[in-house]
Amino acid sequence: MKKELKVSAIKDGTVIDHISPGKAMDVVRILKLEDYDNSVTIAMNVRSSLFEKKDIVKIENRELSEEEVNEIALIAPESTINIIKNYEVVEKRKIELPDLIKGILSCMNPNCISRREGTPKFIVEKKKPITIRCYYCERLMEGDEILKRLRI
Amino acid sequence: MNMKDRDIISIRDMKKEDIEYILEKSEEMEKNMEKNRNLLDGYVLSTLFFEPSTRTRLSFESAMKRLGGEVITVAEAKTSSAAKGETLTDTVKTVEQYSDVIVIRHPNEGAARLAAEAVEIPIINAGDGANQHPTQTLLDLYTIKKEYGKIDGLTIALMGDLKYGRTVHSLATALGYYNVNLIFVSPEELKMPSEIKKYLKSRGIPYREISSIEEIGETDILYVTRIQKERFPDPTEYEKVRGTYKILPETLKLLGNAKIMHPLPRVDEISPKIDRTENAIYFKQARNGIPVRMAILSLVLGVIE
């Protein structure tokens, strides 16, 4: 069978691969790609094997900062990041959650001081499943609670 | 141990050595009240209470004054700067200019931590919403240690609102450092949160959960907290449980020599008839707040080591 690329290759930039199905748009929002000048290709529900699906986001002419990678780690920890130069993968970056997450989500506790002032901060208590603790009110957050509070 | 400039925000920040050290210094304070009368001469404490409190504020003020320090206070912080729209960060940064240490109580969880980030001088958390009240926990531990000469080996029952009560959460967390047996006595709706139970399990602390005083059996300490009506979605449920957690003279038969503690204020969960019994130590407990807070103030100001 002829192998066909459903998503066109990019010359330079970043490919975020193996994103859990349905999460591509969250990645796009986190990276604020709606306002991005260069081309962004989003593929959703691509079959990666007979049973598995994945999302892919390709961003032309952009390398992700460490902070951006951390943000992706929070919503799509299984994904991989490939840096592309001249159509070649020059670097594969492993996604890893930092010990402290700053600013990208708000605390679930409506009575937390960080909902009124300052920058929200969270200590990563557990990486699998992701469990974070608000640096201020000390409340634990996991799973959907994290997703709901992401500033996207 | 040098605790100069250290913030006292949460029991979670403290190692066992820190707790033990503060308890040791509290004992020294209590023994040397007279000698330490001018220890904090020239130092100024600001108390910022964004939420009403009598006991805690007076206790801190008394501790500071007994050490010869000065206290400046905003009686109703909520109605002054905050009402004008000033941020907490700006308020504490301003108050920092007037004082050497700040004691803060605030209705929002995490407020003391935010304040501590904003200023260089030490911040002592006197209660941030439903989260922490570390000096209460330290005085609770001090009281237990003073009564029994130790904490290890004791059986400690915590009773009442274990779900929302910040004092019982902090106390249970701190007791995780000791070799204790815990008993949690609460109605089904107000059980100890699983996060704390998980933590205790991880530290190998045995505990059992029961719903009535009759099931407690032998215990060294019974720590009573108030059950608040507003915690119950259904008022009839509240009516059902309220009577079951009252300590009356006849309850003492079930408790033997157990010492009864309470962070106060009490409403009707301990009959005043209990006050004069050997079991009651809750007023002593309140008094113990003084040496503990004296020690904490002196430590964070770096006047003692």
Image: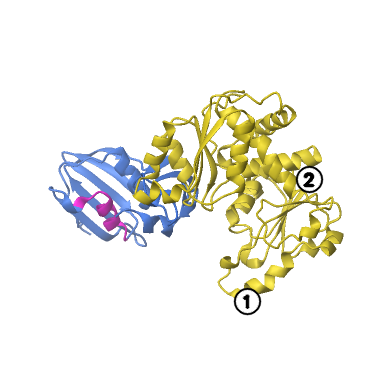
Chain colours: A blue, B yellow
Residue B227 at x, y = what percent?
A: 64, 63
Q: Secondary structure at mark 1?
A: helix
Circle nearer the N terminus (1, 2): 2
Q: Quadrant of the N terminus of chain B?
A: top right
Q: Is residue A8 visible?
A: no
* B157 and B65: which is toward the camera: B65
Judged by depth in the image, the label closer to the viewer, 1 or 2, is 1
Residue A38 at x, y = what percent?
A: 13, 47
- Whether residue B174 sits left or right of residue B49 in the image: it is right
Number of labelled discs? 2
Q: Which mark is residue B236?
A: 1
Q: Is residue B37 above or below residue B242?
A: above
Q: Is residue A69 visible?
A: yes
Q: Residue furthest bottom?
A: B236
Q: Tell me the distance, in whole angstroms, between the alpha carbons under discs 1 and 2.
A: 36 Å
Residue B172 at x, y = what percent?
A: 65, 48
* B7 and B66: which is toward the camera: B66
Give the extent of the magenta segment: A22-33
Magenta span dominant secondary structure? helix
Q: Which mark is residue B154?
A: 2
Q: Amino acid at mark 2?
A: Leu
* Magenta span contains residue A83: no
* B83 and B260: which is toward the camera: B83
Q: Is residue B120 above or below residue A18?
A: above
Q: Amino acid at mark 1?
A: Thr
Q: Is residue B252 above or below residue B46?
A: below
